[in-house]
Image: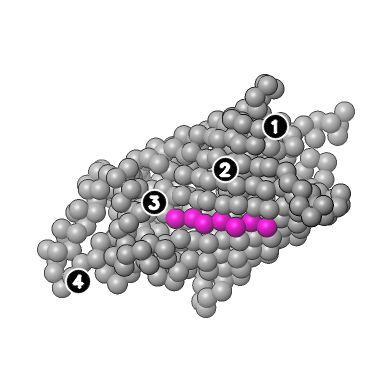
């Protein structure tokens, strides 16, 4: 039996992200939230992205681009660097739940800009007490999820570049029972980034546009293949406009939309176990790639419900001398599809190759455990650090 804390945490992830481990819980007939496994892959790992309303596919290039769009590394000021991210997660539910992320990149000295980048994404639920049906303590669980990826990016035109990435995903629910254990999956990403300087109203601007198709890959199973869940394949489209008001002042506005490329769970007659079993049997049999195409037009409520599955994000960033940063953002998805309705603020400091960022999230719905979530990031530009010590 799954412990009550595990069930509570997973339910919270379902409500917050619109996703949950499909192999562990059957969706209620009245719930329209899209279901996936490995939900931590959808959590923003860096403080800048969190402060900008969970956006980053088209924001200006930074050291945290691996998660959002590795093609942005083609435009970072330095040729090499790395970053660290830490986010305590759902700390209103339990202690010890956290997301940790490390990523790095290297840009080759070639005529055509090319980069190689990688990241490790680790999510832990800490140590959770497990209970049996009679509420006797039977031990502790150590559930975790992690992903390791490698990306290659190349500039294709003066203003446009693309990247491809490969990812290995591993998830361990911590359950030690016959027939139930850890699962793994493989996935790929394809991203693109367009950036162009503009001169409007005798002012200097930079316009960015980006896209990302993430986690195109296999399904994942925790019971030897009897049931298999979808990983969070996702389509992101974004644009950003940066106003260079002065050498010392810039203002950047980001707008982004995200949609999970995962089939909507089946709707069935709750009084008919046969109908329920058939509905979920057909759902589990759907292949991963087929599920991506099916997800574009399978919502029971038609186009209106498909539109509700889009998460909208916007963020504003002010920079003074490219040293001090102030940020604010907002994220919205229809309540039927999750509870990631948040406002956010953040700040950053860049000095001699080091970048420190922090973000704070406010839930815009009552009793939401994401309220008060903080994120912290550290970025290191190795070229600037080297020049500083020369």
> Which residue is at the far front?
201
Mark nearer the viewer, 2 or 4: 2
Q: Label 1: which residue?
A: 80
Q: Is residue 356 left or right of residue 245?
A: left
Q: Secondary structure at mark 4?
A: loop
Q: Residues within 10 Å of mark 3 (few under 14, many from 20)?
A: many
Among numbered discs 2 and 3, the one appearing first in the sequence:
2
- Callout 2–callout 1 Cβ contact below 8 Å: no
Question: Label 1 vs label 3: CA separation?
Answer: 33 Å
Q: State the image quarter where residue 303 is shown.
A: bottom left
Give, as a single range, the part of the protein colored magenta.
253-259
Please tell me whether the stretch drawn in magenta is mainly helix, strand or loop.
strand
Q: Label 2: which residue?
A: 69
Q: Secondary structure at mark 3?
A: loop
Q: Residues within 10 Å of mark 2 (few under 14, many from 20)?
A: many
- Callout 1–callout 4 Cβ contact below 8 Å: no
- 346 to 220, vertically: above or below: below
Q: State the image quarter where residue 120 is shown.
A: top right
- 385 to 310, vertically: above or below: above
Q: Secondary structure at mark 2?
A: loop
Q: Label 4: which residue?
A: 270
Among numbered discs 1 and 4, the one appearing first in the sequence:
1
Q: Label 3: which residue?
A: 261
């Amino acid at each position: 039996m799954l412990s009550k804390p595990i069930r509570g945490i997973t339910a919270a992830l379902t409500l917050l992200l619109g996703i949950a481990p499909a192999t562990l819980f059957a969706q209620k007939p009245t719930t329209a939230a899209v279901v996936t496994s490995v939900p931590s892959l959808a959590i923003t790992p860096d403080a800048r992205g969190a402060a900008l309303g969970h956006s980053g596919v088209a924001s200006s290039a930074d050291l945290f681009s691996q998660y959002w769009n590795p093609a942005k590394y083609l435009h970072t000021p330095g040729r090499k660097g790395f970053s660290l991210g830490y986010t305590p997660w759902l700390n209103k539910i339990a202690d010890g739940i956290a997301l940790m992320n490390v990523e790095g990149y290297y840009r080759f000295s070639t005529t055509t800009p090319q980069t190689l980048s990688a990241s490790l994404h680790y999510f832990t639920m800490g140590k959770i007490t497990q209970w049996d049906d009679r509420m006797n303590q039977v031990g502790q669980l150590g559930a975790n999820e992690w992903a390791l990826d490698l990306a290659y990016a190349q500039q294709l035109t003066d203003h446009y570049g693309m990247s491809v990435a490969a990812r290995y995903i591993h998830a361990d629910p911590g359950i030690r029972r016959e027939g139930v254990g850890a699962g793994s999956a493989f996935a790929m990403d394809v991203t693109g980034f367009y950036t162009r300087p503009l001169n409007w109203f005798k002012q200097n601007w930079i316009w960015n546009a980006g896209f990302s198709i993430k986690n195109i890959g296999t399904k994942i199973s925790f019971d030897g293949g009897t049931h298999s869940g979808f990983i969070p394949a996702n389509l992101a489209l974004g644009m950003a406009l940066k106003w260079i008001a002065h050498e010392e002042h810039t203002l950047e506005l980001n707008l982004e939309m995200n949609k999970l490329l995962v089939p909507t769970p089946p709707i069935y007659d709750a009084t008919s176990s046969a109908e329920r079993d058939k509905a979920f049997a057909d759902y589990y049999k759907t292949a991963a790639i087929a599920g991506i195409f099916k997800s574009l037009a399978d919502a029971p409520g038609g186009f209106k419900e498909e539109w509700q599955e889009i998460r909208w994000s916007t963020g504003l960033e002010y920079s003074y001398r490219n040293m001090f940063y102030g940020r604010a953002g907002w994220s919205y998805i229809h309540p039927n599809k999750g509870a990631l309705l948040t406002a956010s603020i953040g700040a950053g400091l860049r000095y001699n190759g080091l970048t420190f960022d922090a973000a704070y999230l406010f839930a815009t719905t009552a009793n939401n455990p994401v309220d008060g979530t903080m994120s912290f990031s550290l970025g290191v530009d190795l070229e600037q650090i080297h020049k500083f010590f020369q």
